[in-house]
Image (cartoon, grey):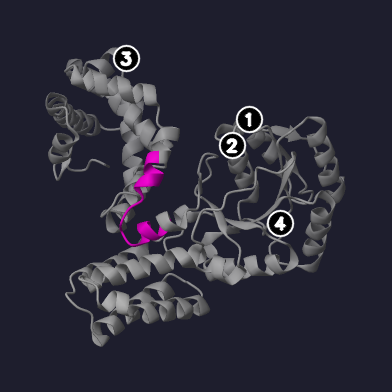
Amino acid sequence: MFDNLSERLGRTVKSLRGQGRLTDDNIKDTLREIRMALLEADVALPVVRSFIEHIREKAVGKEVLSSLSPGQALVKVVNDELVALMGQTHDGVELNAKPPIVILMAGLQGAGKTTTVAKLARRLVEQHKKHVMVVSADVYRPAAIDQLQTLANEVKATFIPSDPGQKPVNIARDAVAEARRQNADVLLVDTAGRLHIDEQMMDEIKAIHQTVEPQETLFVVDSMTGQDAANTAKAFGDALPLTGVILTKTDGDARGGAALSVRQITGKPIKYIGSGEKTEALEPFHPDRIASRILGMGDILTLVEEAQQKVDQDKAKKLVQKVRKGRGFDLEDLRDQFAQMENMGGLSSLIDKLPGVGGNISQQLQNPEHMKQMKRMVAIIDSMTPQERRKPEIINGSRKRRVANGSGTQIQDVNRLLKQHKQMQKMMKKMGNKGAMRGMMQQMKGKMPPGMPF
């Protein structure tokens, strides 16, 4: 998300930092660039106007103009206004109320509501150690109830059965009673979506809301619909006392207009953003960190948190000890690194969070060809015997043919992987000798093997 906006604003910010002083002309040019970048990102026009006006007021203020580095001072103004636009601080779901805490999920059909219910349930189970129950009040969409049951099993949430023959209001009321009976901490209620906002849909969800009296009413919306997402959220907000918004499909939204419009148009905070179908792909929405990402300054805090939560710490320690002792970085280790990377959302997700990177590099890494290449490399390693993975040097011509046939690749692909692994092995050996992060960065900088997807 934000790739296009980040690229445009990144260029503007870079040019600003070099300014010894600010004049009416370069402030005017900067504001024009920011305005165009926001409009291209599909940010709602009223939001753009307000945003630009706030920056203009502060740009000509004493604090910026009298600064020793006015360009950098104006960059800070842009950053602060982005944070203010998106809501200042992260506002998670309320978990301090008397259990069971009822969370009602609303939204249009196709927004990813049911998957988001599972993602949120997983987060509450794994990170907050809550006993979570889920129920589907969607009696209209074929297999909606079965889908939620399958996902509930995956995320270790307790599924409350429901039937398409029941009334949604009765399903929700009975689910609250069952959650109380089982001493659940949280009950997530998945409601039916429609292809568009209609009176029947609104009446039904209002009745459910009145019956279960939820602590949280979250609107789930597809971020790829741009400013329409904010307008739809407002329509739901006018009908229901929403407490927040969850943006979905942010991996496919390169513009980010919804994230920048929702808060100001609805007055409701974005609580989480989701990407992809995997149930772990939901992260808290931190406005300050998102603003930093947009301006190309990275998001190290989120990267560290993801590493703590998703990286196998034992495997990471063993690899460090192995390298320090001078033992080889074998193909099993390489495969583990691919798996850890996948757990953290793929390489493009990592790159987005690194300061001074992102932008074009992230877009290149989202190229389907890079994903195919990584999967091809994993398939090649999987086709090897355990001995071959530990000792790649024993892989001769006949073994290469067998591995290529087993993985559905060509011998050239096997040769390429072995060559790239050998180069990485040398790099790891030098890192082990130096034993310092500085040494690692110097070795890696600009020396990645050609064609390597990272």
Which disc, if any, is residue 352? none
Name the residue type under label 2.
Answer: Arg
Observer-side mark, 4 or 1, equals 1
- Residue that badge 3 annotates: 386
Q: Which residues are magenta?
A: 290-304
Mark 2 near mark 1, Cβ–Cβ under 8 Å? yes
- Which disc, if any, is residue 193? 4
Q: Which residue was labeled with disc 2?
A: 122
Q: Residues within 10 Å of mark 2 (few under 14, many from 20)?
A: many
Does any portion of residue 411 appear in the rendered image? yes
Image disc number at residue 156 = 1
C-alpha distance separating marks 2 and 1: 7 Å
Name the spot of residue 11 as percent of width and height, x first.
26, 68
**Is disc 3 in contact with disc 4, using a CB cutoff of under 8 Å?**
no
Q: Pointer 2 and pointer 4: residues touching (CB < 8 Å)? A: no
Relative to 443, residue 94 above or below: below
Observer-side mark, 3 or 2, equals 2
- For label 1, the SS is loop
Taking depth in this image into account, of 396 and 87 the one nearest to the observer is: 87
The amino acid type, in three-letter code, at marker 3 is Pro
Residue shown at 68% from the left, 66% from the top:
237
